[in-house]
């Protein structure tokens, strides 16, 4: 092939592929610019919606990644590259990776759902997956709890987002319940008056709703009172434990008896 033929071939290829190459380059530049704008708009929308800051990089990264994959496929198609086989291979690879990482992806999806819908937040006390503790961290794959005895519990977000969960910190007020037993034969009116007096003397117990005191059961060895009082959530455990001690000490001073299970053993001597 001489020089003239080579120049003619190059010119022919330039005329054939030049417009496609220029168009692909323009699409790549404009597409990259549009992706940046979409990413900025999406991030602003997440910020206005109050999305958790730890979730925003993941969501914006997913959106940007998907848009860039679409842009690459479009550019390669403009250059005349057959994309059917490429898309099939990409789909098969994605399926294989998805199956291999099904548990991880489930935890990721659970973390996204938790951060979006916020069934709990850092600092809340929750009961989930058989553990009770204060939420220390909400990560994208796991949630970290601190138990009252300072253990660290790591719970995968997949199960946490789909199973039942109790949040003790959602409401500002909580109800404290006690079951207080008195002996058969004791003065029930006096017992009720003593319990009411102890509740009224504790400033942490709210006056509205009023304290509820009623006989709830005639048990085997005691007459049981059910006592229900409302407190501010941070005061729950302090009021609960201190009231038990106050009842025990005051009942003794007031001549009221707190019964406990007893067994009588009778010995019979053979004749």
Image (cartoon, rainbow, N blue to C red):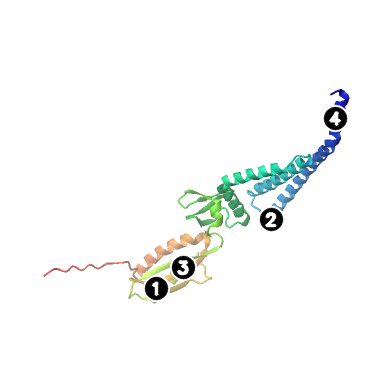
Check disc 4 and report the residue beneath it. Answer: 9
Q: Residues within 10 Å of mark 4 (few under 14, many from 20)?
A: few
At 41% from the left edge and 71% from the top edge, which residue is drawn? 225
Q: Earlier in the sequence, mark 3 or mark 4?
A: 4
Task: Give the structural element (helix, strand or loop) at label 2.
Answer: loop
Give me the C-alpha separation between circle 3 and circle 1: 26 Å
Q: Residues within 10 Å of mark 2 (few under 14, many from 20)?
A: few
Q: Earlier in the sequence, mark 2 or mark 3?
A: 2
Q: Earlier in the sequence, mark 4 or mark 1?
A: 4
Q: Measuring from the top left, give residue 187's x and y in whole percent.
A: 36, 76
The residue positioned farthest toward the top in the image shown: 2
Check disc 3 and report the residue beneath it. Answer: 201
In this rendering, would 169 be left or right of 250?
right
Check disc 2 and report the residue beneath it. Answer: 49
**Quadrant location of residue 97?**
top right
Q: Residues within 10 Å of mark 3 (few under 14, many from 20)?
A: few
Give me the C-alpha separation between circle 4 and circle 1: 102 Å
Residue 113 appears in the figure? yes
Q: Which mark is residue 217?
A: 1
Which one is in front in this view, the residue at disc 3 or the one at disc 4?
Answer: 4
Quarter of the image where the N terminus is located: top right
Give me the C-alpha separation between circle 4 and circle 2: 58 Å
Task: Give the structural element (helix, strand or loop) at label 1.
Answer: strand
Task: Give the structural element (helix, strand or loop) at label 3.
Answer: helix
In this rendering, would 260 be left or right of 40?
left
The residue positioned farthest toward the left in the image shown: 271
At 38% from the left edge and 67% from the top edge, which residue is drawn? 250
Give me the C-alpha separation between circle 3 and circle 4: 102 Å
Q: Measuring from the top left, give residue 11's x and y in whole percent.
A: 87, 31
The residue lying toward the viewer, choosing from 146 and 111, is: 111
Q: Residues within 10 Å of mark 1 (few under 14, many from 20)?
A: few
């Amino acid at each position: 092939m001489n020089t003239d033929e080579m120049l003619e071939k190059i010119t022919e290829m330039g005329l054939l592929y030049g417009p496609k190459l220029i168009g692909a380059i323009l699409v790549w530049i404009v597409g990259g610019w549009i992706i940046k704008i979409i990413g900025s708009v999406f991030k602003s929308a997440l910020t206005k919606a109050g999305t958790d800051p730890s979730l925003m990089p993941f969501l914006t990264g997913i959106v940007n990644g998907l848009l860039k994959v679409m842009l690459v496929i479009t550019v390669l198609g403009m250059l005349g590259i057959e994309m059917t086989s490429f898309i099939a291979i990409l789909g098969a690879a994605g399926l294989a990776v998805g199956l291999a990482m099904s548990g991880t992806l489930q935890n990721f999806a659970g973390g996204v759902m938790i951060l979006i819908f916020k069934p709990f937040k850092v600092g809340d006390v929750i009961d989930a997956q058989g553990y009770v503790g204060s939420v220390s961290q909400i990560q994208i794959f796991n949630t970290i709890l601190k138990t009252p005895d300072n253990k660290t519990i790591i719970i995968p977000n997949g199960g946490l987002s789909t199973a039942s969960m109790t949040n003790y910190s959602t409401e500002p007020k909580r109800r404290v319940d006690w079951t207080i037993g008195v002996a058969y034969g004791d003065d029930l009116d006096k017992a009720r008056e003593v319990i009411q007096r102890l509740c009224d003397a504790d400033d942490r117990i709210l006056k509205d709703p009023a304290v509820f005191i009623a006989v709830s059961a005639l048990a085997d060895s005691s007459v049981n009172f059910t006592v229900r009082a409302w407190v501010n959530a941070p005061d729950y455990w302090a009021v609960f434990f201190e009231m038990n001690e106050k009842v025990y000490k005051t009942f003794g001073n007031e001549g009221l008896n707190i019964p406990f299970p007893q067994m009588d053993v009778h010995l019979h001597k053979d004749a």
